[in-house]
Image (cartoon, rainbow, N blue to C red):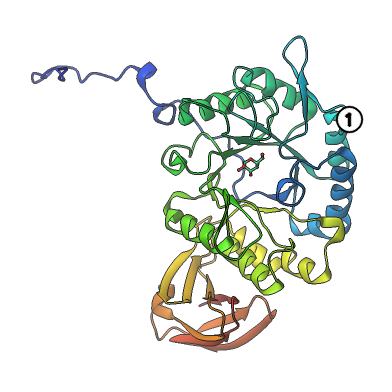
Amino acid sequence: MLSAPVLAQGDPIPVPDPNTLRPSQDPARTSNGLAMTPPMGWNSWNRFACEIDEKLIRQTADAIASSGMKAAGYEYVIIDDCWHGERDANGFITADPKRFPSGIKALADYIHAKGLKFGIYSDAGRKTCGGRPGSQGHEYQDALTYARWGVDYLKYDWCNTGSRDAEEAYALMADALRSTGRDIVFSMCEWGNNQPWLWAEKIGNLWRTTGDITDKWQGKYGHSWGVLNILDMNEPLWPHAGPGHWNDPDMLEVGNPGLDAVQSRSHFSLWAMMAAPLIAGHDVAKMTPEIRNILLNEEVIAVDQDRLGVQGHRVWRDGDREVWVKPLADGGRAALLFNRGAAPAEIAVTWEQLGYPAHLTARLRDLWAHRDLAPRSGSYRATVEAHGVVMLRVQP
Ligand code: GLA
């Protein structure tokens, strides 16, 4: 059995061999300085899966600019799985020549010309989840290719990784991206399997905490989960999020057919309370005014993007009734009265739950009604519709 040598007084304390350190323990590792607020954008997967081509991505970029999404802060246009062709004779990745005949560089240029940023997808295994070439064994080569194309964001998946060590695999790609000298936000997608919140702070900018979301309120559907299930998996991880390193409870289903407008509004509000990345996943060109009003609610977006970067969490629960609080940089709080149930319910937030003395008078603003409420102290009570929320900004 190995045992540590006993030190005599005055002996130098041994320094651990840096080669044996886990990547996250390497004192020389620094974070890349990106994503100081949760990334915002759009990703092709939730709505289109593998049915993507350059025309769809261009039209979506057009719609992000013309609908006001860009002005509201949605910045990254991200193509998910299935954009790939084969590797060429030298091992460089190429685009699917049928779906992306103009090539990825041309697409990135188009998106950049709109004042947007461009994101792409790969996988730490030999193949992606959709069976396209993965980056294993090609990490530096792929990072170089992405930088040449003008990629600003990489989502890096975890299918077909066999016995790979997640921390090593993600650190390797993080180092490859850093070596290009280009600012590339690094989105880690290993579904929370290896507790990335414990080691990824200086490796990636966001890490998935769960399996895939689907456009359902609740339940498990194959490998995917409804909004409430994802919510409950992500909520307890709140202490691990902060500027530059976020818990990612997966992309938004707002605007997809399986959620009604009330559920979509709750989903969006809860993601904002959790300082989650706001990556839309709907058909932007066909967005209804109702969905537009949800995704473009700048007061709710401001809660998500608050520069303090604290993930809000649940402070009270009684059956289907919940109160969530998120501290904000100006000393105020975002508060969410959330009703999971199928009937309207009365819910109150107390100043104690907000971390304020009960006698303190505070101003209140309703972020969905877009109106100021009368200042008050002690508590605030409202009737919340089925599956709905009342979202407030409280200002002492
Ligand atoms: C995984 C990811 C999804 C999506 C698909 C693509 O399931 O979790 O977000 O990227 O792969 O195949």
For ligand 1, the image quadrant comes to top right
Judging depth in this view, the residue of 215 and 57 nearest the camera is 215
Tell me if 174 is positioned left or right of 21 in this view: right
Residue 100 image offset from top left, x and y in percent: 87, 32
Outermost residue to the top: 89
Please give the residue where the numbered disc 1 appears in the rendered image.
98
Residue 254 found in image quarter = bottom right
Local secondary structure at mark 1: loop
Give the residue at the far left of this rendering. Answer: 8
Residue at image position (87%, 45%) is: 56
Q: Residue at x 57, y 48 (%)?
A: 223
Q: Residues within 10 Å of mark 1 (few under 14, many from 20)?
A: few
Residue 176 at x, y = what percent? 61, 23
- Picture layout, residue 184 above or below residue 305: above
Q: Position of residue 354 (x, y in %)?
A: 44, 74
Residue 47 against residue 101 in the figure, above or below = below
Q: Seen from this angle, which residue lies furthest front?
A: 222
